[in-house]
Image (spheres, grey):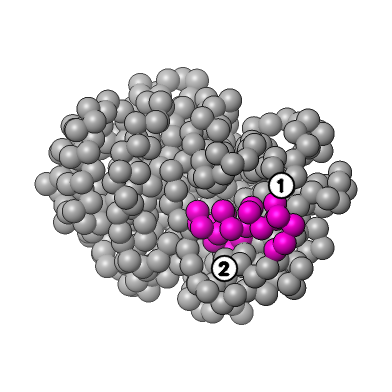
């Protein structure tokens, strides 16, 4: 069978970090790697491609079009399924990805034949063997329009399969993380036991942290040609076993690459002794979720760190010359003084890069219920749920004032706090211009939202 795997284009009106962190479609690469032996498969990345899906379908003539999704993509994915069916009603359309796992009901549509709630080698093989034979029955993890999208009831999670990096070879020069370009992404371990109230990752991967099969990981590391690898583990600094395994493997393979990771404040403090070793083998930057300057908010988010711990972690990372890409969430109950306090707090932390996003109580998270009666948009307004737009009505200042404070704070940290000189030295003027261009897009979007 000919199978076309599609990543939807960017949603123009959404405020996201995609202009700064533009990664490869790892899930599609895994599916490609699993199916390539038995089928003719191609990945069509519409975040890069200029041609339409219709043109691509005319060129490739697929039997199946499979589309991945995030929350903000729902309407676009449905449009793409409709476009495929208009090209040929015989084309089988299948939808998967994060949103299909979290909210499959959003894809109940006449143009969607199948919804993959989760994807494993087993259900992929079963699915394509079934449709190739012309008979499809009930399958674990897959909802069928034929069966009114009923689930078998068996719970599951996406399996981490060996991705085929060559499947996106023609796009790879465009994949980047801030100034590091080109850059690959991968995962070393799944799950997160911190179960923070605002985080989707543990809902998707589970609350138990476990390493991915080391043989698979070793093969993946050998296949990556890019000089930089971003590890998308929710918290790379979660256990001594994980850190020792990673350091040992990199040394055994004699890899000479740049590494970027997500790391918790608790991990930085608890596993400080490993930071020097990580720095020596290539760790360049750590994405740290400081989240807020208030202890009561950290407690409400189920974070086990304090505002003072944040400062201590920042000092430790400076000591080992590891760049910090800090993230914060602006609470909807903040007033102008709180935003001013945040700016002063960030100045103390001295991160290389800072992002500030409005607190987003995503549907399916415990926090959603807390703020449900204050939501500015319905859960079905998918394109609004980008983690960049204000979703909860501010309680102490007007929405326009709140956006103004967000805008002012983002501009302040980018101009006066972020280490622009270091960034130019490390990433070059060209990459800095690209990042600045992305920042200006976010500014324009915030200004437009202020005037809604």
| Depth order, front residue of 378/451 | 378
Horizontal side of residue 247 vs 204, given as left or right: left
Mark 2 or mark 1, which has the lower sequence index? 1
Q: Name the residue furthest left.
A: 273
Q: Which residues are magenta?
A: 116-136
Q: Residue at x 73, y 72 (%)?
A: 147
Q: Could you say whether the residue bearing mark 2 is in a helix, strand or loop? A: loop
Packing grade of label 2 (10 A; few <14, some 14-19, many >=20) is: many
Residue at horizontal 48 percent and vertical 67 percent from the top? 156
Q: Is residue 30 left or right of residue 286?
A: right
Taking the spot 69% from the left edge, 42% from the top edge, the residue there is: 1
**Residue with the mark numbered 2:** 140
Q: Residue 76 vs residue 430: left or right?
A: right
Q: Is residue 36 above or below residue 312?
A: above
* Residue identifier under label 1: 65
Q: Which is nearer the eye, 324 or 401?
A: 324
Give x and y (percent) for residue 173: 52, 25
């Amino acid at each position: 069978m000919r199978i076309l795997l599609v990543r939807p284009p960017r949603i123009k009106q959404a405020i996201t970090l995609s202009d700064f962190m533009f990664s490869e479609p790892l899930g599609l690469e895994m599916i490609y790697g699993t199916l390539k032996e038995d089928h003719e498969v191609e990945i069509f990345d519409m975040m890069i491609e200029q041609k339409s899906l219709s043109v691509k379908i005319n060129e490739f003539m697929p039997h199946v079009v499979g589309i991945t999704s995030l929350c903000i993509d729902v309407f676009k994915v449905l449009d793409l399924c409709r476009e495929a069916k208009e090209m040929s009603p015989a084309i089988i359309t299948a939808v998967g990805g994060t949103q299909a796992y979290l909210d499959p009901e959003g894809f109940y549509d006449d143009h969607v034949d199948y919804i993959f709630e989760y994807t494993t080698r087993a259900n992929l093989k079963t699915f394509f063997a079934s449709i190739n034979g012309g008979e499809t029955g009930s399958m674990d993890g897959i909802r069928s329009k034929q069966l009114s999208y009923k689930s078998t009831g068996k719970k599951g999670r996406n399996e981490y399969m060996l991705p085929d990096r060559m499947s996106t070879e023609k796009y790879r020069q465009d994949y980047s993380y801030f100034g590091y370009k080109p850059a690959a992404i991968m995962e070393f371990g799944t799950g997160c036991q911190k179960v923070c109230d605002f985080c989707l990752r543990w809902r998707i991967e589970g609350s138990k942290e476990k390493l991915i099969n080391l043989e698979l990981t070793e093969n993946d590391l050998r296949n990556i040609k890019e000089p930089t690898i971003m590890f998308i583990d929710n918290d790379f600094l979660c256990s001594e076993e994980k850190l020792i395994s990673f350091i040992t493997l990199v040394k055994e393979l004699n890899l000479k690459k740049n590494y970027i990771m997500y790391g918790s404040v608790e991990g930085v403090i608890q596993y400080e002794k490993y930071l020097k070793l990580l720095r020596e083998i290539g760790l360049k930057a750590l994405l740290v979720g400081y989240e807020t300057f208030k202890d009561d908010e950290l407690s409400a988010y189920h974070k086990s760190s304090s505002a003072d711990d944040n400062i201590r972690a920042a000092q430790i990372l400076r000591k080992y010359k590891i760049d910090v890409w800090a993230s914060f969430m602006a609470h909807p109950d903040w007033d102008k003084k709180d935003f001013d306090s945040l700016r002063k707090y960030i100045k103390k932390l001295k991160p290389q890069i800072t992002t500030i996003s409005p607190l987003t109580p995503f549907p399916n998270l415990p926090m959603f219920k807390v703020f449900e009666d204050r939501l500015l948009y319905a859960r079905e307004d998918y394109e609004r749920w980008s983690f960049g737009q204000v979703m909860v009505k501010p309680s102490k200042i007007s929405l326009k004032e709140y956006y103004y404070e967000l805008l002012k704070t983002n501009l302040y940290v980018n101009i006066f706090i972020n280490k622009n000189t270091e960034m130019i030295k490390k990433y070059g003027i060209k990459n800095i211009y690209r990042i600045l261009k992305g920042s200006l897009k976010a500014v324009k979007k915030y200004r437009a939202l202020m005037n809604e």
